[in-house]
Image (spheres, rainbow, N blue to C red):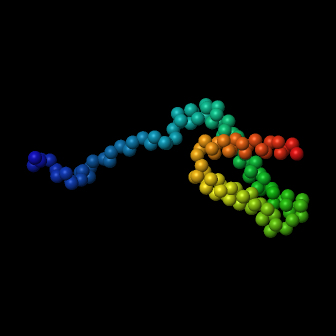
Amino acid sequence: PPTSASPPPSASPPPSASPPPRPACPSCLTWSKLRRMYSNVDFVGLTVAAAINMGAVRAMLSSISFVYTHYYELSTTVGGVLISVPPLTGLLASLLVARIAAKTSPARLVAAGMVAGGGPPPLLLL
């Protein structure tokens, strides 16, 4: 039974009470996590490879319109259409692959990917 000194259960804390401390965010980036990431060879290697890849893509995208218009003497419209073909193809391929992946087991997907990955290298010799 509640005593006369205890507040009712629905009573809010007095206004002078400070809010409870926030728990540490488990996914927050800290200096120790940064040190651990930068000392990991796999992380640094993949990060550098991704940075080089993204830099190459941006360099290609910034210069391809000049190549199409000045070297191949195409109109700006045709150059724009040609520039839009790879992203559109990637989008359509992603949609197709998502449908296939939803209906197939991961083991079959890996096997199919390994078989498909063996095709392009011999074609480079042609």
Q: Report if residue 52 is visible in the image.
A: no
Residue 109 position in % (x across, y down): 63, 45
Residue 48 position in % (x across, y down): 69, 39
Residue ID at (81%, 64%): 79
Q: Quadrant of residue 24?
A: top left
| In the displayed structure image, the side of residue 50 where residue 65 appears, left or right | right
Say if 110 sits above or below 59 in the image. Answer: above
Say if 117 sits above or below 81 in the image. Answer: above
Residue 123 position in % (x across, y down): 83, 45
Q: Which quarter of the figure is the C terminus placed in?
A: top right
For the image, the number of numbered tags is 0
| In the displayed structure image, the side of residue 116 where residue 27 appears, left or right | left
Residue ID at (72%, 42%): 115
Residue ID at (66%, 38%): 46
Q: Nearer the viewer, residue 106 or 43?
A: 106
Q: Nearer the viewer, residue 11 or 56?
A: 56
Q: Quadrant of residue 117?
A: top right
Residue 87 position in % (x across, y down): 71, 58
Q: Report if residue 112 is visible in the image.
A: yes
Residue ID at (33%, 45%): 20
| In the displayed structure image, the side of residue 17 where residue 100 appears, left or right | right
